[in-house]
Image (cartoon, coloured by chain):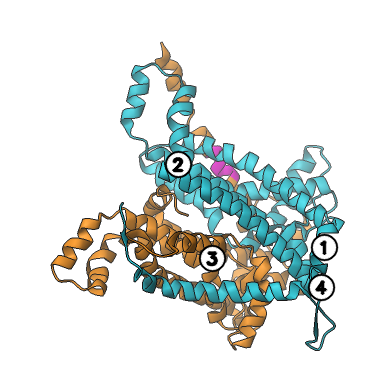
């Protein structure tokens, strides 16, 4: 009796995700659409697709050093941050997943609170701190500042993956005469390779999308692409075509990274550690 | 897992501790410092005690942005959590479409926040944006740069667009961890769709949903870039949330004392909520 109704419902099951994805894609489509128009055409009126298709905006971004240097500095601080965060988080996550030590729970909670701290609270003191130590306007300043929220996150995710590895493996390795560093690099890290991948992905993601701190800690030399965009929006009038093209180009690195880790994302989320 | 007691594990935590403390403790102490002092420039500071705190807590401007902040966070939680669960329930469980769905849905999460704001700005412009143009074509007067209500609608819709996928991914991961045997048992018992959801799926999603709500609460509570780029906090102060107000006071008006006291109050509120959720979560895990 229930079969047919259920089948109809299941037949319509694809509708909800499809509608949702269409909703997600519409603003992105509009951005891509704008990026292929000239500024005059954009301001001239409403049209669903470019009437005079042009690559001028992309050409401008890829040949003007102000623009492409923005991409280079963004990518460099994101990569530095990802490497530092994962490298520092690995032993810490191991400690949290294997040992109990004085103040461990408090330390873990304190780390988490930093993931939750509003960056706006830290913007001004960060500016002073990194000016004082002479790192202001370098990718290192942003990379180190982003550790504030990425390291707690990395520890949290990695701890989840490491707790999934049975402790007997550690003990067997020690009996076989492995020292801790050798065991960790040779045996343990390959076991949680997918976890390291997921962690690196999330560090990349949160460092890539953050702007407030990145903007505060740079002025000229290490200006991230996102900040170059805000400046363009305010100083050179209303160059929507350029802005849209730059926006599209910031989506691409994320899309590439997401494509490579798509199978691990669900797994990383499944452990409930984000 | 039963863990061994080993205080030497502190050495493994040391790098993390150093890096995070450098970024958290020094700036936080700077903020505390400012929050109890008055300055007249030239690096001259005078101790003021709790004057700034009293001023902030009594100021109507702070109350207004706090109220807006809670309203915004409440609204987006009410929309994003049920919507995210609904989409996750309707997603295919296996097959090639799973990857397609996941990649497309995760895409908004990876767009820099100011690009999200700029994108929605272009999307919602009343004359040339797809959204704005369509709404106006339907006969509804819509202009998010002038009408507070339209601005709120746009900011909330933008956040739903931006972050619902996070709830979807979390809820989906929770759903996938349910063994097939549960569904088979439910089918044998002739359980309705609703009771499958209420008694099998919802309890299994409990943990991930707590995390989803926690993350959405925290991230929406510190939201800055997207509404700042989209509306600049306006029209008037209609979408000036806590972070926007704070940055305005600190960097715009250079009211160091006020801004610092606001930061501390703001941070303590986040901390309190974080602690409540953390306690709830660890208690759940212990069970």
The answer for which chain carries disc 4 is B
Which chain is assigned cyan?
B
Q: Badge 3 is on which residue?
A: A149
Mark nearest the camera among 2 and 3 is 3
Q: Chain of mark 2?
A: B
Residues beneath discs 3 and 1 located on the same chain: no
* Location of residue B180 (image quadrant): top left
State left or right for residue B59 relative to residue A252: right
* Other residues around mark 2 within 10 Å, as few (<14) / some (14–19) / many (≥20): many
Q: Residue furthest top?
A: A1
Q: Is residue A191 above or below residue B150?
A: below
**Hey, which residue is sitting farthest left in the picture?**
A176
Q: Is residue A238 magenta?
A: no
Q: Which chain is orange?
A: A
- Cα gap from disc 1 to disc 4, whole angstroms: 15 Å
**Quadrant of the rendered structure where residue A91 is?**
bottom left
**Residue at 45% from the left image edge and 58% from the top image edge:** A258
Residue B37 vs A189, above or below: the answer is below
Query: Residue B255 got which mark?
Result: 4
Badges 1 and 2, same chain: yes
Q: Which residue is at a point 58% across and 71% down the rendered structure image? A: B24
Q: Which residues are magenta?
A: A18-23
Q: Residue at the location (41% across, 68% down)?
A: A89
Mark closest to the chain's N terminus, 1 or 4: 1
In space, the residues marked 1 and 2 are separated at their CA atoms by: 46 Å
Can residue A260 be seen at all in this image of the molecule? no
Dot 2 falls on a residue whose secondary structure is: helix
Question: Dot 1 corresponds to which residue?
Answer: B54
């Amino acid at each position: 009796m229930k079969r047919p109704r259920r089948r109809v419902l299941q037949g319509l099951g694809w509708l909800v995700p499809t509608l949702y994805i269409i909703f997600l894609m519409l603003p992105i489509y509009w951005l891509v659409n704008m990026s292929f128009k000239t500024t005059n055409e954009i301001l001239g009126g409403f049209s669903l697709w470019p009437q005079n298709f042009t690559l001028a905006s992309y050409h401008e971004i890829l040949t003007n050093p102000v623009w492409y240097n923005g991409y280079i500095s963004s990518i460099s601080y994101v990569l530095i941050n990802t490497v530092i965060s994962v490298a520092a988080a690995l032993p810490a996550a191991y400690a949290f997943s294997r040992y109990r030590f004085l103040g461990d729970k408090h330390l873990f909670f304190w780390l988490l609170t930093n993931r939750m701290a509003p960056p706006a609270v830290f913007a001004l003191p960060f500016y002073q701190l990194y000016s004082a130590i002479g790192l202001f306007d370098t990718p290192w300043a942003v990379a180190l500042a982003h550790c504030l929220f990425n390291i707690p996150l990395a520890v949290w995710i990695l701890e989840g993956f490491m707790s999934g590895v049975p402790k007997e493996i550690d003990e067997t390795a020690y009996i076989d005469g492995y020292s801790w560093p050798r065991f960790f690099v040779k045996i343990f890290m390959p076991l949680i390779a997918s976890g390291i991948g997921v962690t690196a992905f999330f560090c990349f993601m949160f460092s890539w999308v953050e702007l407030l701190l990145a903007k505060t800690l740079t002025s000229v030399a290490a200006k991230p692409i996102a900040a170059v965009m805000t400046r363009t929006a305010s100083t050179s009038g209303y160059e929507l075509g350029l802005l849209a093209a730059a926006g599209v180009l910031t989506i691409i690195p994320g899309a590439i990274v997401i494509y490579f880790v798509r199978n691990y994302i669900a797994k990383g989320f499944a452990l409930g550690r984000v | 897992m039963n863990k061994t007691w080993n205080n030497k594990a502190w050495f493994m935590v040391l790098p993390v501790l150093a890096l995070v403390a450098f970024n958290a403790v020094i700036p936080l102490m700077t903020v505390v410092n400012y929050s109890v002092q008055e300055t007249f420039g030239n690096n001259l500071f005078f101790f003021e005690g709790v004057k700034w705190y009293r001023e902030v807590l009594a100021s109507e401007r702070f109350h207004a942005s706090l109220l807006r902040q809670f309203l915004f966070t409440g609204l987006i939680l009410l929309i994003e959590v049920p919507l995210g669960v609904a989409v996750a329930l309707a997603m295919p469980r296996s097959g090639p479409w799973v990857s397609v769905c996941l990649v497309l849905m995760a895409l908004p999460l990876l767009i820099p926040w100011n690009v999200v704001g700029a994108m929605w700005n272009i999307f919602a412009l009343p004359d040339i944006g797809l959204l704005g143009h369509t709404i106006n074509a339907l006969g509804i007067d819509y202009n998010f740069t002038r009408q507070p209500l339209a601005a709120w609608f746009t900011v909330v819709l933008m956040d739903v667009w931006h972050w619902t996928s996070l709830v979807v991914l979390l809820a989906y991961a929770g759903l996938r961890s349910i063994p097939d045997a549960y569904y088979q048992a439910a089918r044998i018992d002739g359980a309705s769709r609703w009771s499958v959801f209420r008694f099998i799926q919802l309890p299994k999603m409990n943990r991930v949903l707590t995390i989803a709500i926690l993350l959405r609460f925290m991230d929406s509570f510190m939201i800055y870039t997207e509404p700042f780029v989209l509306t600049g906090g306006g029209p008037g102060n209609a979408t000036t949330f806590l972070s926007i107000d704070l940055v305005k006071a600190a960097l715009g008006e250079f009211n160091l004392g006020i801004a610092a006291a606001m930061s501390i109050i703001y941070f303590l509120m986040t901390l309190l909520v974080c602690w409540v959720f953390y306690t709830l979560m660890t208690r759940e895990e212990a069970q």
